[in-house]
C-alpha cells in the first residue's frame, strides 16, 4: 500500500514490486487510481487495487481505512508492506496486526510538522508500533530518529538502492548532448534540483541561497525539476532574485536522467528525509551532490563529505559557489560518487534485504512461504527454493 504516488517513494515502490514480480510473487498494490504510481505498477506487472486516498490525513480517513480493510479481505495477501506515513496510518488502523505487516516510513510523520501536531504524531507512532511486525528504515539515522521519539518496535534496515545499469553514465548522453536535448546552453555551470516542489524539499531555501550566486560564479544557472503545491510561490520568489533568468522551472519529468547528465551538481536542500533517492540516482550517473544534514544524507556520501545545515541559505550559497566554481573538482567528485554508489546502493542488494525482512516476519508468524518463493540468499542466483 502506498500514498504518496509520485516522487522518490513511488520509484522505490515500483523498483521493489518489479523485482518481486520477476521473482514470481503475486504482487498487489493498493494506491489511488489514475496516478503515475498506479500506471508504473501496472506496467511492472503488479495488480493495482484502486484505493481512493489523499496524501494527508483528513475527514476522509475513516472511509479510507474501511476501503483498505475491504481490499485486504477480498484479496487475502500473506504479508502487507505499508509505504510512507499516510499508508502507514490507514493500513495499521485497518489491519491492527491481523496480518504480517511491515511499515516503511520513508521519513517520519512527526518530522514534517511542529508543535501540537508533532506531539500527536509521535504519540500515534508509539501506539502503532504494536501493529507492525517490523519498522523498516532506509537509514540508520531514520531509525535513530524513531528511537529518540520513543518508538519501541522491531527494527530492520534496507538502505535505498538504484538500478546501476539504468543510471550508468556510459549509457547516458554526455553533458553537452544532454543540454542540447533539453534545449539548454552548453556553456556555464548548471546546478539541478530534482524533487517535488514542496516545503520538505527546501527549494525556497535554495532560491534564497541562489540570490547573488550568478554574480560570484558567472554564467551559473539553476534548474528546478519537478512540480508540486509550492510551484506558484517558488516562481514568485524566483522573480524577485537579482538575476531571475538564471533560474529555470523545468516542470515534471517522467525520467530525470537527462537532467542528471546535463548537471554539474545535484543539490537537494531538504528539511527532512529518510534517505532521499534522487541523490543516489545522480551519484550513480556520476554527478556530485550537495545535501543538507537530514537523515540518510551522510550515509550515502563519502566520509567527511560536507553537509549543509538545514534552513541555512548563507551556508548553502557558500557551498554552491565553491562547488560550481571548480568544474574539475565536480567531475572528480562525480566519479567518486559513482564508485561509492556501486559499492553501497545496488538495487539488488536493497531488494534482497527487503526479502529477508519478509522471510523473517513470515517465519515468526509461522506462515508458509508463497509458491515460487526465493530466499534472499538465492535471489541473486536465480534459483528457486
Image (cartoon, rainbow, N blue to C red):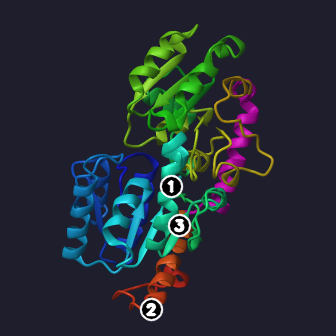
Label 1: state its secondary structure. loop
- Confirm whether the magenta stretch covers residue 306: no
Instruction: From the image, state whether disc 2 or disc 1 is nearer to you.
Output: 1
Q: Residue 345, how many percent across, how many down? A: 60, 60
Q: Residue 297, how many percent across, how many down? A: 65, 48
**Magenta residues, start to end:** 319-346
Q: Residue 286, how many percent across, how many down? A: 63, 45
Residue at label 3?
Answer: 136
Residue at label 2?
Answer: 385
CB atoms at circles 2 and 3 under 8 Å apart?
Answer: no
CB atoms at circles 2 and 1 under 8 Å apart?
Answer: no
Question: Which mark identifies residue 106?
Answer: 1
Marks 2 and 3 sit apart, C-alpha to C-alpha, by: 25 Å
Q: Is residue 264 above or below residue 358?
A: above
Marks 3 and 1 sit apart, C-alpha to C-alpha, by: 9 Å
Occupied quadrant, residue 324 = top right
**Extreme front residue here?**
116
Label 2: state its secondary structure. loop
Instruction: From the image, state whether disc 2 or disc 3 is nearer to you.
Output: 3
Amino acid at each position: 500500500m502506498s500514498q504518496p504516488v509520485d516522487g522518490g517513494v513511488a520509484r522505490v515502490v515500483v523498483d521493489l514490486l518489479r523485482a518481486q514480480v520477476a521473482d514470481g510473487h503475486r504482487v498487489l498494490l493498493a494506491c489511488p487510481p489514475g496516478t503515475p504510481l498506479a500506471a508504473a505498477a501496472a506496467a511492472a506487472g503488479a495488480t493495482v487495487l484502486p484505493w481512493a486516498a489523499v496524501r494527508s490525513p483528513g475527514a476522509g480517513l475513516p472511509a479510507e481505512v474501511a476501503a483498505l480493510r475491504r481490499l485486504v479481505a477480498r484479496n487475502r495477501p500473506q504479508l502487507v508492506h505499508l509505504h510512507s506515513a499516510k499508508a502507514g496510518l490507514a493500513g495499521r488502523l485497518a489491519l491492527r496486526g491481523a496480518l504480517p505487516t511491515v511499515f516503511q516510513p520513508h521519513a517520519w510523520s512527526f518530522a514534517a510538522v511542529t508543535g501540537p501536531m508533532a506531539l500527536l504524531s509521535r504519540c500515534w507512532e508509539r501506539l502503532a508500533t504494536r501493529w507492525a511486525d517490523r519498522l523498516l528504515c532506509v537509514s540508520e539515522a531514520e531509525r535513530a530518529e524513531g528511537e529518540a521519539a520513543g518508538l519501541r518496535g522491531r527494527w530492520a534496515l534496507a538502505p535505498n538502492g538504484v538500478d546501476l545499469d539504468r543510471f550508468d553514465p556510459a549509457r547516458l548522453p554526455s553533458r553537452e548532448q544532454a543540454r542540447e536535448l533539453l534545449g539548454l546552453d552548453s556553456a556555464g555551470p548548471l546546478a539541478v534540483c530534482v524533487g517535488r516542489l514542496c516545503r520538505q524539499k527546501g527549494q525556497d531555501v535554495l532560491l534564497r541561497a541562489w540570490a547573488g550566486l550568478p554574480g560570484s560564479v558567472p554564467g551559473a544557472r539553476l534548474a528546478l525539476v519537478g512540480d508540486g503545491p509550492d510551484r506558484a510561490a517558488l516562481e514568485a520568489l524566483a522573480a524577485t532574485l537579482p538575476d531571475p533568468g538564471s533560474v529555470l522551472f523545468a516542470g515534471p519529468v517522467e525520467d530525470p536522467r537527462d537532467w542528471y547528465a546535463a548537471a554539474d551538481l545535484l543539490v537537494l536542500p531538504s528539511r527532512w528525509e529518510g534517505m532521499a533517492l534522487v541523490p543516489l540516482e545522480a551519484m550513480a550517473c556520476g554527478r556530485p551532490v550537495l545535501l543538507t544534514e537530514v537523515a540518510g544524507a551522510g550515509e550515502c556520501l563519502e566520509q567527511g563529505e560536507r553537509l549543509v545545515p538545514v534552513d541555512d541559505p548563507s551556508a548553502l550559497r557558500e557551498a554552491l559557489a565553491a562547488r560550481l566554481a571548480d568544474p574539475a573538482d565536480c567531475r572528480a567528485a562525480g566519479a567518486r560518487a559513482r564508485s561509492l554508489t556501486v559499492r553501497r546502493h545496488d538495487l539488488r542488494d536493497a531488494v534482497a534485504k527487503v526479502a529477508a525482512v519478509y522471510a523473517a516476519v513470515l517465519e515468526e508468524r509461522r506462515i508458509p512461504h508463497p509458491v515460487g518463493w526465493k530466499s534472499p540468499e538465492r535471489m541473486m542466483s536465480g534459483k528457486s527454493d
